[in-house]
Amino acid sequence: MTSSKEKFSIVIPVYYNELNIPNTIPRLQNLQDLLPHFELEFIFVDDGSRDKSFELLLEHKKNDSRIKIIKLSKNFGSMSAIQAGLSLASGDCIGIIAADLQDPPELFVEMIGKWKQGKKIVMATRSDREESFSQKMFSNSYYYLMEKFALKDYPSGGFDFVLLDKQIVEELNQIQEKNTNIMSLIFWLGHERDSIPYVRQERKFGKSRWTLSKKIKLFIDSFVSFSYAPIRFMSLIGVLTALLSFLYGIFVITNALIGTIELQGWSSLIAITTFLLGIIMVMLGIIGEYLWRILDESRKRPAYIIDKIFE
């Protein structure tokens, strides 16, 4: 007999979360008491963890048929893991939450209330975060630049804890874009959305694997995917450099003819040459980032490889 209940799927990317899983799964399961009129589905995506995360997920699955597990063949990154989870989600609405419990799962109840009112995207936006000063500074700078140069009205505290209507998930599954920020892509779609502010909590178990190199890659991916700012920056620097060079050329010719100021030779020449070479190398690096992503997309390799699915 077909259930008359609406279905709520939750996608949880997992990467080295063996200390979190024993606490995360019960918190998620408790949502059933808060959402009695919904059928729940938990989709855990093991993103190539080398600890006991996968084994713990299998143990919990034995006692809860609502748990589905996707095991990726290796670590593809959290954005690809989320894409893999969304491809299997079958709910009327779909939530995305991290496995480390820094985001309160209970907030899904309020988010579903907004969804019931017709909002297709409900973002839990961070009004503050219980993190170190350096982490706050990096995150706030990133989201400020995103709002300023990439996506207008992007939440100042960012979001990766979100509830989506199934229409949004279908659209994301059709896009299948690599080297992107899935949250920025959700915002870019432009559907009617709402937000709920909350304070992101301090991580209580385990160590974050969100390294500086991964943060830098996300920063570059976001700007290359959603902003013309890097290319326009290069054009502006090129125009300014050409203008300054032209003015300096007039200055040199004038003084060579009049001889009012003695021009220094090697020092000024070397300084200008190294400065211009530095600018050129930066510009080549920016162009290289765009070219690499074009090459990566042209190869048509999938964003992730699924090793096994446990339904």
Image: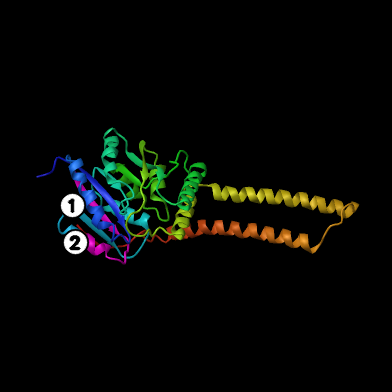
Looking at the image, is mark 1 or mark 2 nearer the viewer? 2
Q: Tag 2's secondary structure?
A: helix
Assign the C terminus to one quadrant of the image: bottom left
CA gap, disc 1 and disc 2: 13 Å
Pick out the residue farthest to the bottom: 50
Assign the N terminus to one quadrant of the image: top left
Q: Given the image, on which type of amino acid does mark 2 rest?
A: Glu
Instruction: From the viewer's perspective, tell me whether residue 33 is left or right of residue 77.
Output: left
Give x and y (percent) for residue 21.
26, 57
**Was residue 46 drawn as part of the magenta stretch in this picture?**
yes
Residue 59 numbered mark, or none: 2
User: Dot 1 corresponds to which residue?
Assistant: 66
| Count of all numbered marks drawn on residues in the image | 2
The residue depicted at 90 percent of the width and 51 percent of the height is: 258
User: To which quarter of the image does residue 93 belong?
Assistant: top left
Q: Given the image, on which type of amino acid does mark 1 rest?
A: Arg
Q: Tag 1's secondary structure?
A: loop
Give x and y (percent) for residue 270.
74, 63
Give x and y (percent) for residue 33.
18, 43
Instruction: From the viewer's perspective, tell me whether residue 2 is left or right of residue 53.
Output: left
Write the start and end of the magenta stretch as one range: 39-59
**Was residue 43 drawn as part of the magenta stretch in this picture?**
yes
